[in-house]
Each structure stands twice: as structure tokens, then as C-alpha cells.
Image: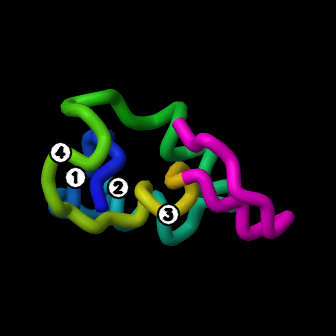
Amino acid sequence: MSSGLRYEEHGAPWSDDTESYYAPDLRKLALTHSEIVGPPGDHWHYNNFNPPVDGNDSRTGNLSAGC
């Protein structure tokens, strides 16, 4: 799964891994803190930004188009 969003796993303490762990709204962080680096689904790279923007809203149980 790949959203096409930039995601930095290294660079603690301010990596995307660290920020996504503490963020109260992961979807908001993913959509405002990152940038598009490629088309969605182009390659496999799982990261913490993918699930909240993949179209499945776990808060409501609804499926949507995602981003």
C-alpha cells in the first residue's frame, strides 16, 4: 500500500514515525505535514500515513474515495 505521500522513518526525534505516534489526528497530520512524491499505489511502502488516507474511515466505518 502506498499513498504517494513522503514519509521519513529516520531522523528521530522529529521523524514522521515519531510525529505520527504522538499526533491526536493522524489523518490531519498526513494531509498537512507531508507532500506528494508519487502516484498512490505505485509501489509497496507501508507507513503510518497510509491507513488514514486509504479511504476507510475507521471513526465511522464508512468507505470513501480517500485522497
Q: Is residue 61 magenta?
A: yes
Check whether the beta carbons of the residues at disc 2 and disc 1 lie within 8 A of each other.
Answer: yes
Identify the residue position indicated by label 4 in the image: 42
Query: Which residue occupies 41% across, 65% down?
Result: 48
Residue of label 1: 8
In-image side of 44 versus 58 (left or right):
left
Label 2 element class: helix
Residue assigned mark 2: 16
Kind of residue at disc 1:
Glu
13 and 33: which one is in front? 33
Chain-order first, disc 2 or disc 3: 2
Residue depicted at x 43% and y 56%: 49
Range shown magenta:
55-67
- Measure the alpha-carbon separation of dots 2 and 3: 14 Å
**Residue 45 spot, x, y in % from top left:** 19, 62
Q: Nearer the viewer, mark 1 or mark 4?
A: 4
Up-down: is 47 above or below 67? below
Q: Are marks 4 and 2 in contact (CB under 8 Å)?
A: no
Q: Which residue is mark 3?
A: 51
Residue type at mark 2 is Asp
Task: Find out whether residue 65 is within the magenta segment.
Answer: yes
